[in-house]
Amino acid sequence: MIRFENVGIRFEDDSKPVLTAVDLKVDEGELVLVVGATGSGKTTLLRCVNGLVPHFSGGTLSGRVTVDGRDTRTHRPRDLADIVGVVGQDPAAAFVTDTVEEELAYGMESLGIHADVMRRRVEETLDLLGLADVRGRALRTLSGGQQQRVAIGGVLAAHPRVLVLDEPTSALDPVAAEEVLAALTRLVHDLGLTVLLAEHRLERVVQYADRVVIVENGRVSADLPALAMAMSPVSPPIVDLGRLAGWSPLPLSVRDARRVAGPMRQALAGRTPARVIRSKTLTAASESLLSARALVVNRGRRTVLRGIDLQVHAGEVVALMGRNGSGKSTLLATACGQLPARGGALRTGGLDPASLKPRELLKHVGLVPQDPGMLLYAETVEAECRTADTDVHAATGTTRTLLSHLAPDVQDSTHPRDLSEGQRLALALAIVLAGEPPLVLLDEPTRGLDYGAKTRLVASLRSLAAQGHGILVATHDVELVAELADRVMVIADGEVVTDGPAAEVLAGSPAFAPQVAKVMHPQPWLTVADVAAALEAS
Amino acid sequence: MTRAFHDPRLPRLLHPAAWWAWAIGLAMAASRTTNPLLLALVMAVAAYVVAARRELGAASPFSAFLRLGLFVIAMRVLFEALLGGGVPGQTVLLNLPQIPLPTGWGVRLGGPVTLEGVLAAAYDGARLAAVLACIGAANALASPRRLLRYVPATLYEVGTALVVGLTYAPQLVDDARRVRAARRLRGHSGHGPQEMARLAVPVLDSALERSLDLAASMESRGYGRSVHRDARSRRKATALTLLGLGGVVAGVYGLLDGGSAPLLGLPLLLAGSVAAAASLAVGARRERRSRYRPDPWAAPEWVVSASGAIAGALVLVAAQRGTAGIILQTSPALWPTLPWIPALGVLVGLAPAWLSPPPPLRAIERAGGQPKGHMWDTHPEDITSQESSGHSIGSSS
């Protein structure tokens, strides 16, 4: 179905090619997962399939890419629109129309599909992706997960034979991600759809893949998932656990792993993970940095938070979870004074953040927004660090030193836009930390981060907590929460559903359990590191 | 098209072009008269139809247009009072201190304010206010965005650009708000000219990036597949459509503007329509795009557009024949009287309040809050916002 023959891609101003000598054949009905570190060329590979590279992006293509016999050198993306559907990283940026139904129909209108067929397919797609109750809504009022599903639906409705998805689940909560992936596998199995998919959160997708393509240093290799994972530079926790235990073949799904994990569970029976002990000794007696009582917050006329009680203490990492649109971001926005409380009270360090002047605010609380780029204005990293120093009246070089700790390999002269996702996040975090706020808030920090960048983020946040910062992270990423959080709070529809130690909350819920917890159930192990430490001790 | 669409009781959204045709008819009537009673009647008709047939939850720019109309009247009267408008009058209301200007300028500053002058200005302002009210009514009943779906195939690119623009404006506002919020996080207020310059960089940056993403998305979803087949026929059809639309615009202007040569309006309108129809036919031959859920054009659409046309035509004919009371005499000022035939004509414009199908959500509400019938045709912004705040549709009414 898709053939890459000795393909190389080179962009004009780059010193070395993004991809070299790529040979790849994807058969009809295959679900192929593309993995690789950030910046390895995954996105470029995907965009080659429908000719966006090079027709749209510029650059030079050598070799040949054919899809269903059509050569991308002679067919522009629009000429391939009837066989290839592409969903990019940011769904909102790709919307052409402004309501759900029109967006679903857009591709079909361009292809000239008959109105009756179009009507039927829109209805089918609405059901398939669970969008029926938002069908008439304006796209920009939807939550991130809904937008992602509309983006996929808009492409699916045109019934392409190849579907190319770039990080389709990174913005979704675990349950919504499961739904999208289930829909995809159903399409693959029932309709013989060919799917090419890039994803950082391998734990969500690797078990569905027929083959895994690894992109590393511009080279591409494809193999069966279990074999590919054995040598992949990035791997999900379950594979790490398998490597640790020396299981062969490597298990890719929780089911496979549980079958071989019996001896390991036996070996660890009766032990308590180190972190459970820590989270119990982390007393509630330490200073409260953020406290909310019966907090009610409106966005416009809509009540988003209804009666939230929350405490974040010094030295504690609290994870805020909940489905898309449940009010996580609103809570963070309120905590840093961007939205006023309509009822109840919220205090950061004893003060109402909404009443503080911006200059005082950043001495109390710092927020790294979902898109860290929002915090960046300057032309170079160096200039950005300098303005951050003057913004908070810190000694020159404060931000730069912080940044060097968080991300050692960032060059001074780089434009912030050219940084990798992880580096940009580190820069935003360094800027926020320059004001030495006791309380640090992060909104969905792991979007677009590979496992390496995630590990570095966890290490820096843990050391901040050890220095006495209180940290509140809103996230969908259960593996991050497992690595990072002391306490987990789940909110639904603006109310607190659960608030408790991470181990209890995560291990006790099928939706929020990390892979290791699922494998080791009923024992409360959350991460590979915990297991490794315990095995070493025994 | 099913026969059901001919029934004006079936809840659905009327074809937007029908509402705009109706509004243009009313606006035509308003533009030909300065009789305040007739103008008030036009505004009342527009307001009543809007109140009866606007979809619940849709944006309502009608009152904004009414306010704009009031502003126009006030400005017109103010300028007349300050500068004088050349309407000779004997009844002096008050004397403003006059600042001497060189003779021959044609204006004066201050001086006597006459009843006749003020009335002439107010009538003239009211005429524009009534036209604005009609446009506001059309906006409230059928958003311009819905109308843009029906731009001719040959002008598809222009239409798309307009739609994208309409979508981008609110997004830019969103972006600006987000960037300003982020600016606060860095310890700045986000106010003041220097701050604005700072904010502009990330806002424009993200707007540029977004437009590239959008272009990539449109390209990979097949935008322009069918339109760019043959350059020659495309040029021909585009030229014809531009000619046609230009003709229609000129014709409508001729009809609306009583001051132009009497026979300029109608022939231009006709010639323009013919050219537009011809180009549509040429364009449609090559049109391979299909349209999702096109609004049907059935009996109610004819009724609505005809009612506007009748209202416009009766006033137009009366104005052409110089019927008393269409153009009100202001010097000396007379008490306005209502000319019967044009007034009846304007009242015909009220017909859509009963003879057009009720919009779906409004129909649901009237049926006692029970959603029934054509739920597929709803635009449930209201339903979802109520759901998200914890109420069902049923409990809301």
Image (tube, rainbow, N blue to C red):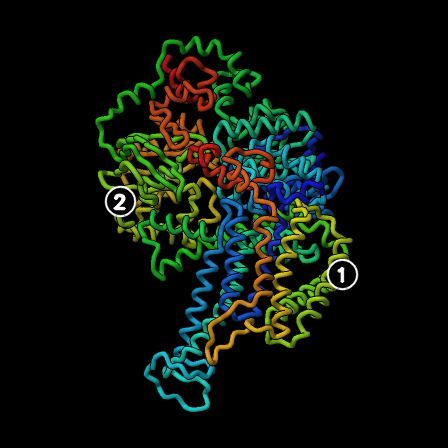
Residue drawn at point x = 60 percent, y = 54 percent = B19
The residue labelled by disc 2 is A363
Q: Secondary structure at mark 1?
A: helix
Residue drawn at point x = 40 percent, y = 25 percent = A482
Report in which chain the residue with disc 1 lies.
Answer: B
Locate the N terminus of chain B and report the quarter of the image it occupies: top right
Residue B17 image offset from top left, x and y in percent: 63, 54
Which quadrant of the structure image shows residue A501? top left
Residue drawn at point x = 65 percent, y = 39 percent = A85
Report in which chain the residue with disc 2 lies.
Answer: A
Front tag of 1 and 2: 1
Q: Secondary structure at mark 2?
A: helix
Which quadrant of the structure image shows residue A256? top right
Which residue type carries mark 1?
Ala
The residue labelled by disc 1 is B278
How far apart marks 1 and 2 lie (CA) works out to: 69 Å
